[in-house]
Image (spheres, rainbow, N blue to C red):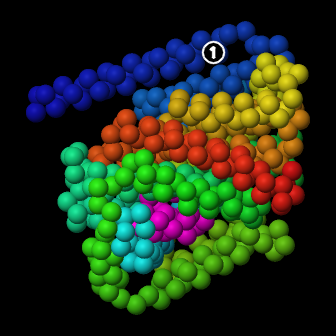
Amino acid sequence: MGQQAKNIDDDDTVKYGHLLGCVLFGLLLWFLPTPQGLTDAGWHLLALFITTIVTVVIKPMPVGTIALVALTLTIVTNTLTPAAAFKGFSDQVIWLVVLALFIAKGFSVTGLGNRLAYYFTKILGKKTLGLSYGLVLTDLIMAPAIVSVTGRIGGIIYPIIRGIADSYESLPFDKSARKIGAFLTVTSFQCCTVTCAMFMTAMAANPIIEGLVTKGATPILKEFTWGMWALAALVPGLISLIIIPWVIYKIYPPEIKETPMASQIASDKLKIMGRISLNEWIMIGTIGALLVMWIYGKKLGIDAAPAALIGVAVLLLARVLDWKSLIKMDSVWDTFFWFAILLMMATNLGELGVSSWISKSIEQSVGGMDWRFAFPGLLLFYFYSHYLFASSTAHVTAMFLPFLLVSISLGAPPLLAVLCLTFVSNLFGGLTHYSLAPAPLLFGAGYVSIKDWWKIGFIVSLINILIWSTVGLVWWKILGYW
């Protein structure tokens, strides 16, 4: 008991030390002279924003607390007016994330997510490689409707992986992990970064990208719709999902190659679940209608967030979802709170001219270079700088818009620059055991060593870069996107 209390005290001491370091860092930035080309308000907001991002990465306290302090400081220091500081909470982008998280709950409460996973496991699960494709296919089908990649991978895919691994006595933190558990875990994780890249509603930071591109003082594009995003990602995404499991199977092979038990277990689970329930049919119909509205939103005159609102309303009226259970989803409201504040700060940086100032500073370092050489270099730097981030959201809000503006100023076609940076903003999530929300959960399960996790992450990053920079470019050219 005494040792446990000592460990807690030591942990608190470390966190307070980190917090003090962040405060001192923020004060140093704040009192530095305002650089030429920036207003005092712009510089002070940038100082607060950088300090907030650094503190979010170090995480000496909950992200919501960090965001609340940042919001407070923007107002009490007169850096932003209250109206400007609070406008993030009314942004459609933020509400799209919240509503999509509510819709995701429908997969859980109806059992539809598990049914899909068991169904594909039954069909493809007789061999280990086929089993991995079944899990990936399950993730792909759920991705357009579940904005929480943690919900998909941690809530649906991982429990099935764990059940299959246990049935073959493939145990975490043990040599037997390589039997099957390690392969399925790392393959599902690496492929989830691709499914995240394929849909605007497949990862929480994606709607922020859409907001940064189409809103603000100087929008980059008049529109960047759900359908445009999905169509652009379709071909390179599917090719990545086909190739990645096979490559991992070759470089990190499971000891067990045949898995008839997995198929039988899935079949037994489906028998227990019985026929598709009415609530599952309602869920299927709602998701189908949402996809139609998201794909043809422009023609129908319905934006993504109102479409999601319709979906949630239908599920509530049909009693698939219960309002009391939704308001108890504290993780969703926590996400809503800090997400709105980060997006607000990033948006105001653009309106105060800070993003343009940063992009011009970067541009000066690569000035005179042909964009066809400079742009790939910027993309690679943006991709591998994710080693420094423990949050895709933090990375996107901090670096996406400046790098986009630099790329366009160098001569890169705007839509091409948007597509490349958008997809990289998802694909870099596979680099480390902390680079995407489900990573700590899957790595912490104990099947894969940190050395193997990083090695596979780097190899897969090269594969994705190769596929999306070749097949992707050709596909986007065919579509007339550049």
Instruction: Label 1: state its secondary structure.
Output: helix
Residue 419 horizontal side relative to residue 243, left or right: right
Q: Nearer the viewer, residue 112 or 160?
A: 160
Q: Specify the quadrant that holds the N terminus.
A: top left
Looking at the image, can residue 448 be seen?
yes
Looking at the image, can residue 344 be seen?
no
Q: Is residue 159 above or below residue 208?
A: below
Q: Is residue 72 above or below residue 254?
A: above
Considering every residue shown, the one lying at the far left of the view is 1
Percent position of residue 21, x then y: 47, 17
Q: Quadrant of residue 381?
A: top right
Percent position of residue 168, x then y: 23, 63
Q: At 52% from the left edge and 14% from the top edge, which residue is drawn?
A: 24
Q: Residues within 10 Å of mark 1 (few under 14, many from 20)?
A: some
| Residue identifier under label 1 | 29
Percent position of residue 210, x then y: 73, 51
Q: At 78% from the left edge and 72% from the top edge, which residue is drawn?
A: 296
Q: Does 138 lie within the magenta span?
A: yes
Q: Which residues are magenta?
A: 131-153
